[in-house]
Amino acid sequence: MIGSDRLVSFFHLLLLWLHLIAAITWIGGMVFLSAVLAPLVRQRKAAPEFMALFRTAALRFRLVVYGAIALLLGTGPLLLHERGLSLFDPHRWPTVLRVKLGLVVVLLILTVVHDLILGPRMRTISAISDAARSPWERTLMRTSAWLPRLSLLVALAVLWAAAALARS
């Protein structure tokens, strides 16, 4: 029979492992899409079959991301509780935790803007010929690639803050 200390230790390890797997999945997928797949699409001058592949991969990845977010949001508060901290008592949080959670909020906002606002708009605009696009649509097309890159930088900053938190 497993002792209660060993069971608590196992539960903590399981929570931490699930939290890490979710973070690795989200960030790893972001790296793959932005460093591998997106450059291939741009290199091919957005040939229709490559654009279709990219869109399909991005949409499938979105489901993975939302699952990872759910797992992170479910395990994070439990891991905080194990440290004797509460989401509802932020004045007791170490500074690095405040930074990490602030970055997480920024990352969640960027993800929602990308997936629910900018992404659908880009699909609509990309179906229009460049000559028929308004100046705003052309600007949006040129700058839209920066949001995923910014999201990746914020995600890497979250990872850095998590490593700093683990050391504290």
Image (cartoon, rainbow, N blue to C red):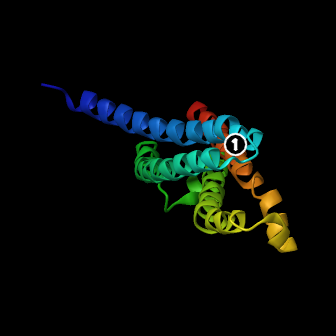
Looking at the image, residue 4 lies above or below residue 95 = above
Residue farthest to the left, as pictured: 1
Query: Which quadrant of the figure contains the N terminus?
Result: top left
Question: Which amino acid type is shown beneath numbered disc 1?
Answer: Val
Label 1 sits on residue? 41
The residue that appears at 68% across and 41% down in the rendered structure is: 34
Answer with left or right where residue 54 lies relative to residue 71.
Answer: right
Residue 18 point in image, percent of width and height: 40, 38
Residue 157 point in image, percent of width and height: 69, 42
Observer-nearest of 137 and 101: 137
Residue 31 point in image, percent of width and height: 64, 37
Answer with left or right where residue 62 lies relative to residue 134.
Answer: left
Whether residue 125 is visible here, answered yes or no, is yes
How many marks are shown on the rendered structure? 1
Query: Which quadrant of the figure contains the C terminus?
Result: top right
Residue 108 appears in which quarter of the rendering? bottom right
The residue that appears at 49% across and 62% down in the rendered structure is: 88
The residue that appears at 43% across and 53% down in the rendered structure is: 70
SS type, badge 1:
helix
The residue that appears at 77% across and 52% down in the rendered structure is: 146
Looking at the image, residue 42 lies above or below residue 123 = above
Whether residue 165 is visible here, answered yes or no, is no
